[in-house]
């Protein structure tokens, strides 16, 4: 009945429950225990500790002394931070080089300031509190100019001011719309942008949590169903600084194998070995690059993980070997549910070795998923993660290097959509309920899988794709946005979803290109592929009984557009790979909102239909049907149209034309790009690299190009190449210098072909101090030359 108009029957009006808020109360005293400051209040305790000069952790527990153990998300310990503490009758003031905490005593209110006196996070009328249900809550002052970003995987627009969001990993097949406030990922972290400066808050609580930026005009709050108020304040002051600080706590994406950055093809399901071989043959014969083909649940024997159906896939080892010889990886799906079957090896081992989730009385929890009645591994135990990881030898011994984790919220086919919250997790001898650890189930499954693949892959980097996770999920896998639909609205929604995931530390993310459920059209697939070519993760995936949406599915015209942009992805891979390298070092995402580079430009604050790749490449996808023009916002500076080389002055909105085969792309003046060429997939090496330089009349352009073998972990031992390019335009002179900052890897490149954009007349060129002749095309405004290396 709730799916009909009965849901809004006047008799159904819900009364708000009166759940009184209990304030932490007045200050009673404090003591210093090493670097830890412990405060006692009327109604509980508050601990404060600096993790570094720019990060402070604040923990409130109204029921007992705060627990200071690191969570599953936080992987760093506090550094030694010098600070001063001053006490007056009314205040405690705790200061270091970047932060100042002004703590009002009566009642206790904690205000966090920057070193230059700006209030980052303030409390006035209300602060820390709890209620009779042992729910904990924190209120903060909200300024008129505050804009909020992050929160992991959320629908709707980029700026989350005015929204209320729940963190509870949920299998949501339909609908995905702005009303859905809980999806597959729970990342209780956000960034605030105010007057050009940024700071962040990470609320490290694994219970169901809620962030309310909606209910009040001058206050926001975050609360949890249990546990502690345990949050980190990240000082910024730039959006990039906040990302670096957050990922210093929760970890950064490991550099993925290069094949995982190529084009991936999936469907629910490619049901037989013959169908998979035919699919691969089509890609090869049509000259469409592809790096991975996915196997959904139909490859298994009765949906038992760690099995192949012997009739559908009679010789998986040979299939995988043949595809790898063509440069195509096979990525099978692996769900957590283990079928209840006493003759099934994984179930037998799980029972005998005590690896499954149980109730307090020792009864195993069973839930209905694809295989039917199933048990679920208790990933909170290290020995269970090790056991689960060892089971993956079934795949790795076949030559598989990538795994796709699905249904790991965990999803169960019942009214709650998940495991009974009364289930107990062993948690390495510190038992906790599923109510508390639900949100980390997928994270810990990902940890088990990633480390197993790393151990078993003969030195090759593993690839993991995961649907569910918690803060820190970026350490183990890429995240896709789940079961979207073949709607134009979902194409548009994918852009801010991916940007906010990037702001939340998840640099390797993307939607199902074409949409998973419902039926795609050719035009929708073409436009979605254009977007997908520049999202960090690039996979076409469609559901059971939907129309086919492989690149050639809609005929020649659409097929040519789709092929063009898949090929364009590979042309841009050298540049993207460098950005992935930087993300692995800094946490700053590959795909980013404009506000990250232009935090003082209010036109960028909720710009949800454009994004940047790196600092200076603007992507403005077409997100509506039968649309061949769109408005594009260009920030300050001059911007070149990627396709025409025409230069436009920024700090303005402009109407651009975009035929069906055109994705609007703009390159900022001064940019240096490294581009490759059309290749069949990443198994093919490049002998020639293109370096594109976009003329700027001011300053020196700088770009560092990263390269390694794209496959192993040898880069960690110094086997990588880092080239720096510096370019300066002055009067009629162009000066380009190239230097190897690190030369521990011998690339396949034999030539570098330089393309200079924006030249209207002949100029003198010096490369590494020597005069070089270049070919000028005055009509296109470009000049070219090449060097051997």
Image (cartoon, grey):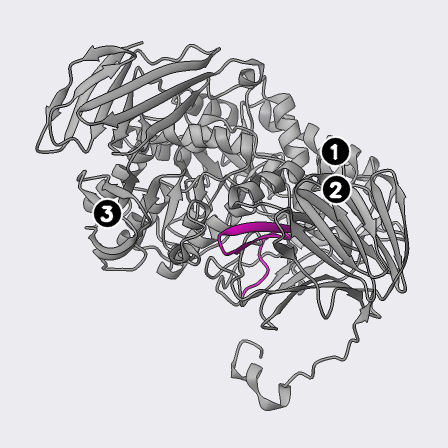
* In magenta stretch: residue 535: no
127 up-or-down from 305: above or below: below
Residue at the disc numbered 3:
649
541 up-or-down from 692: above or below: below
Residue at the disc numbered 1:
79
The tag earlier along the polypeptide, 1 or 2, is 2
Answer few, some or many: residues within 10 Å of disc 3's Cα (few below 14, many 20 plus, some between 14 and 19).
Answer: some
Q: Position of residue 442 (x, y in %)?
A: 65, 45
Does residue 419 appear left or right of residue 614 in this picture? right
The residue under the point 71% across, 67% down is 124
669 up-or-down from 414: above or below: above
- Could one spot residue 77 in this view of the protein? yes
Does residue 606 appear left or right of residue 677 in this picture? right
Q: Position of residue 278 (x, y in %)?
A: 35, 33
Q: Position of residue 589 (x, y in %)?
A: 49, 40
Magenta part of the chain: 180-201
The residue under the point 30% across, 15% down is 687
| Circle on res. 523 | none
The tag earlier along the polypeptide, 2 or 3, is 2
The residue under the point 43% across, 48% down is 593
């Amino acid at each position: 009945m709730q799916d009909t108009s009965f849901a809004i029957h006047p008799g159904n009006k819900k009364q708000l429950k009166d759940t009184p808020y209990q304030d932490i109360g007045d200050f009673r005293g404090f003591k210093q225990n090493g670097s830890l400051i412990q405060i006692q209040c009327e109604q509980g305790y508050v601990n404060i500790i600096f993790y570094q000069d720019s990060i402070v952790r604040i923990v409130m527990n109204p029921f007992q002394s705060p627990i200071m153990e690191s969570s599953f998300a936080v992987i760093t310990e506090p550094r030694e931070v010098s600070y001063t503490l001053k006490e007056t009758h009314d205040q405690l003031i705790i200061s270091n080089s970047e932060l100042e905490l002004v703590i009002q005593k009566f009642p206790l209110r904690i205000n966090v300031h920057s070193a230059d006196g700006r209030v980052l996070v303030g409390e006035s009328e209300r602060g820390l509190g709890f209620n009779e249900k042992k729910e904990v809550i924190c209120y903060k002052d909200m300024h008129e100019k505050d804009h909020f970003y992050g929160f992991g995987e959320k629908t709707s627009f980029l700026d989350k001011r005015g929204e209320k969001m729940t963190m509870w990993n949920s299998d949501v097949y339909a609908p995905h719309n702005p009303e859905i406030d809980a999806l597959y990922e729970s990342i209780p972290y956000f960034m605030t942008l105010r007057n050009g400066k940024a700071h962040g808050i990470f609320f490290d609580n694994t219970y169901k949590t809620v962030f309310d930026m909606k209910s009040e005009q001058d206050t926001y709050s975050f609360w949890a169903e249990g546990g502690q108020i345990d949050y980190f304040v990240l000082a910024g002051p730039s959006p990039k600084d906040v990302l670096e600080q957050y990922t210093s706590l929760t970890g950064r994406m490991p550099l993925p194998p290069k094949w995982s950055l190529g084009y991936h093809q999936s469907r629910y399901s490619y049901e037989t070995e013959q169908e998979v071989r035919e699919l691969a043959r089509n890609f090869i014969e049509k000259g469409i690059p592809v790096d991975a083909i996915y196997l959904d649940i139909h490859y298994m024997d009765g949906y038992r993980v760690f099995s192949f159906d012997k009739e559908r896939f009679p010789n998986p080892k040979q299939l995988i070997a043949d595809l790898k010889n063509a440069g195509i990886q096979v990525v099978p799906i692996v769900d957590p549910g283990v079928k209840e079957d006493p003759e099934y090896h994984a179930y037998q081992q799980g029972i005998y070795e005590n690896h499954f989730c149980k109730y307090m009385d020792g009864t195993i929890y069973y839930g209905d998923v694809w295989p039917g009645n199933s048990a679920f591994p208790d990933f909170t135990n290290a020995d269970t993660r090790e056991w689960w990881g060892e089971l993956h030898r079934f795949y790795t011994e076949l030559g598989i290097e990538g795994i796709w984790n699905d249904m790991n919220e965990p999803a169960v086919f019942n009214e709650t959509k998940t495991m009974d919250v009364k289930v107990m997790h062993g948690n390495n001898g510190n038992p906790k309920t599923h109510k508390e650890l639900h949100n980390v189930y997928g994270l810990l499954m990902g940890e088990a899988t990633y480390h197993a693949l790393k151990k078993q892959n003969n030195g090759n980097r593993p690839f993991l794709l995961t649907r569910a996770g918690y803060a820190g999920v970026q350490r183990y896998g890429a995240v896709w946005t789940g079961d979207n639909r073949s709607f134009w609205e979902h194409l548009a929604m994918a852009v801010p979803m991916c940007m906010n995931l990037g702001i939340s530390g998840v640099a390797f993310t993307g939607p199902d290109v074409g949409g998973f459920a419902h039926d795609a059209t050719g035009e929708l697939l073409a436009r979605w592929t254009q977007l997908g070519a520049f999202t960090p993760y690039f996979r076409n995936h469609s559901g059971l009984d939907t129309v086919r949406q492989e690149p050639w599915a809609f005929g020649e015209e659409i097929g040519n557009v789709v092929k063009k942009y898949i090929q364009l992805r590979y042309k841009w891979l050298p540049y993207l790979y460098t950005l992935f390298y930087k993300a692995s070092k800094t946490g700053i995402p590959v795909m980013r909102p404009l506000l990250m580079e232009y935090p003082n430009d209010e036109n960028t604050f909720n710009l949800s239909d454009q994004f940047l790749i790196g600092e200076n490449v603007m992507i403005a996808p077409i997100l509506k049907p039968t649309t061949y023009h769109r408005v594009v916002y260009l920030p300050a500076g001059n911007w070149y149209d990627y396709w025409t080389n025409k230069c436009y002055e920024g700090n303005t909105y402009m109407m651009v034309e975009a035929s069906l085969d055109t994705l609007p792309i703009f390159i900022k003046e001064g940019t240096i790009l490294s581009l490759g060429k059309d290749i069949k997939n990443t198994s093919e090496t490049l002998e020639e690299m293109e370096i594109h330089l976009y003329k700027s009349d001011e300053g020196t352009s700088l770009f560092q190009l990263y390269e390694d073998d794209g496959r192993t972990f040898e880069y960690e031992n110094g086997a990588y190449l880092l080239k720096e390019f510096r370019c300066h335009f002055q009067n009629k002179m162009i000066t380009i210098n190239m230097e190897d900052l690190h030369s521990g890897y011998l690339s396949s490149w034999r030539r570098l072909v330089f393309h200079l954009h924006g030249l209207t007349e002949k100029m003198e060129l010096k490369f590494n101090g020597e005069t070089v002749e270049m070919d000028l095309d005055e009509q296109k405004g470009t000049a070219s030359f090449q060097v051997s290396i």
